[in-house]
Amino acid sequence: MQCVILAAGEGKRMRPLTASRPKVMLPVANRPILEHLIAAAVEAGFTRFVLVVGYGEREIREHFGDGAGFGCRIRYVTQRQQLGTGDAVKACAGLVSGPFLLMNGDMIVGPEDIAAIREMDGPVMGIHRTDHPQDFGVVTCEDGFITGLEEKSPDPAGDLINAGVYQFDEEIFARIDRIGLSSRGELELTDALAEYVRERRLRSHMLDRWLDMGYPWDLLDANARLLARHSPSIEGEVEDGVVLKGTVSIGKGSLVMAGTYIEGPCMIGKGCKIGPHAYLRPSTSIGDRCHIGHATEIKNSIVLPETKIPHFNYVGDSVIGAQCNFGAGSKVANLRNDHAPVKVAGMSTGKKKLGAIVGDRVNLGINCSVNVGTVIGPGVNIAPHSFVEGWIDEGTSFQ
């Protein structure tokens, strides 16, 4: 059986992080989302994959190649225009035969769930119970079959959602051919699924380990969950006087200098310089070739490769892009004074603690203060002693 993964979208809600990479290549626990998904499917027994690519496809192709380095064989098909999920699935016609697994590429799914769906007969939809069903299409079920599909609604009828994991055979392509464009001008896979529902043929499977990546702060939740499951590994150099507590991984060529205190779960990539006297707190991932320096504290954050946060800095509950530089004394706040949920661009995240979402190549001068829920676009230069809040557009010189 083959596994088809839809990986063609940009992920506009993930901006500015997707300005220079596709959503599926955003890192959690120092690996792209898509890599986690492929690894789970391989563990579940899949060896043949078809990736539907589009936005940022070069990065995906270069990272995964033919799949040999990931224990599988990968073929690619390009979705030339973003015309919906039905169109993306249709692009695979002729490349798959017999039953196949279909998954959205922007989520984490446990290998046990993938294996369970593989053992089922006929069309299958993975479902999940969530606290925020208004962000998804909602389903109703009876006796193991999907009996109703509801479009995303601010007032959904239930809390069971379509989780974006399916099993089909070639019949799905004919069903997609029969549907028309939606009001958004797209071919919607759910319109094709409606036929299966009317015929009472679409089985359901409740997913246990499932994480969606809709917004940047979802990356932090996934990062924490995945780090909590990883094993310790020390491949770099750790000087005397370093304290490692809990599960800590340190990549090849990395140096952790004296006086540094690291609380796991924590993951440090390859070629990093940490310390002296740095403090890394739980659920933090540091990408390759980063410098986290003297008297710098980082907590529950994702730092992408080649970023420097070198002295007297604080970063909490944040996602920091690649090739950024923090001036001495610059700090990111992560808690409102009134302890209300943090808002980003006027939207409540539901999170009591959330720092900043920072794009690639951002430079902060010395002693800058970045407020909770701030979004900074790629290539922004921020003058020393600035107070930064709100949404700062790409390429801005902030005075």
Image: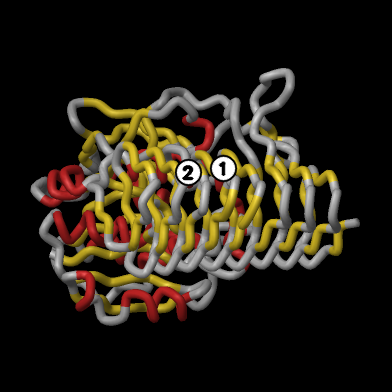
Relative to 278, say whether 395 is above or below: below
Q: Is residue 85 left or right of residue 169?
A: right
Can I make out residue 110 in this image?
A: yes
Q: Residue furthest top?
A: 338
Upstream in sequence: badge 1 or badge 2: 2
Mark 2, residue position: 280
Spot occupied by residue 263 in the image (x, y as percentages of width and height): 40, 38
Q: CA distance from mark 1 to mark 2?
A: 6 Å
Relative to 28, say whether 306 is above or below: below
Q: Residue at x 73, y 48 (%)?
A: 330
Mark 1, residue position: 297
Give the label on residue 282, or none.
Answer: none
Cβ–Cβ under 8 Å for marks 1 and 2:
yes
Q: Element at badge 1?
A: strand
Q: Element at badge 2?
A: strand
Q: Residue at x 81, y 46 (%)?
A: 388
Indicate the amino acid at tag 1: Glu
Circle 2 crowding by C-alpha within 10 Å: few under 14, some 14–19, many from 20: many
Q: For this rendering, which residue is in front, 108 or 187?
A: 108
Q: For this rendering, which residue is in front, 267 or 193?
A: 267
Q: Residue at x 13, y 64 (%)?
A: 1
Indicate the amino acid at tag 2: Leu
Q: For this rendering, which residue is in front, 275 or 146?
A: 275
Spot occupied by residue 338 in the image (x, y as percentages of width and height): 73, 18
- Residue 70, picture quadrant: bottom left
Spot occupied by residue 249 in the image (x, y as percentages of width and height): 32, 52
Spot occupied by residue 362 in the image (x, y as percentages of width and height): 70, 62
